[in-house]
Amino acid sequence: MPNIKSAKKRVKVIATKTAQNKATKSALKTYIKKAYIAVDTNADDKAEAVRLATKKIDQAVAKGLLHKNTAARAKSSLAKRLNASA
């Protein structure tokens, strides 16, 4: 445990940011999973689900949660599966 006041604050701030990042990443994974399910089940709103997942992926990149190449791969995979189901 840190003894210096600024180090104690850093521990608290890092814990808060870690929790926020974890929640955001979890929500992102949920959007991606819903998009895959919508495409696989040929739902009426599959294009909308993919669009929303793509938007959330881009937002995660902007926040620094995902690397841009990881995001590009995820978006490409979604689009590829959507186009194959059409």
Image (cartoon, rainbow, N blue to C red):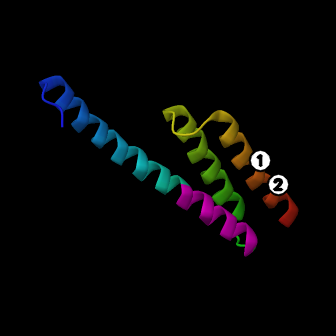
Q: Residues within 10 Å of mark 1 (few under 14, many from 20)?
A: few
Residue 25 vs residue 58, the one in the foreground = 25
Q: Are marks 1 and 2 in contact (CB under 8 Å)?
A: yes
Along the line of sight, the residue nearer the viewer: 33 or 4: 4
Residue numbers of the magenta segment = 29-41
Q: Residue at x 65, y 62 (%)?
A: 35
Say whether residue 11 is visible: yes
**Quadrant of the rendered image containing residue 3:** top left
**Is residue 55 placed above or below 5 in the rendered structure?**
below
Q: Residue at x 56, y 47 (%)?
A: 56
Residue that badge 1 annotates: 76
Q: How many marks?
A: 2
Query: As drawn, which residue projects farthest toward the bottom?
Result: 41
Tell me: 5 left or right of 16.
left
Q: Residue at x 24, y 35 (%)?
A: 11
Of the residues shown, which amino acid type is indicated by label 2? Answer: Lys
Instruction: Compare residues 5 and 61 and report the one nearer the observer.
Output: 5
Give the CA distance from mark 1 to mark 2: 6 Å
Q: Is residue 31 magenta?
A: yes
Q: Position of residue 43 (x, y in %)?
A: 70, 72
Q: Residue at x 61, y 63 (%)?
A: 33
x and y percentages locating residue 29 in the rendered image: 55, 57
Identify the image quadrant of residue 82: bottom right
Quadrant where the C terminus sits is bottom right
Neighbour tally class for label 2: few under 14, some 14-19, many 20 plus, Cα within 10 Å = few
In front here: 7 or 71?
7
Where is 43 relative to 16, above or below?
A: below
Q: Is residue 10 magenta?
A: no
Residue 45 in sight from this viewpoint: no
> What's the amino acid at mark 1?
Ser
Q: Secondary structure at mark 1?
A: helix
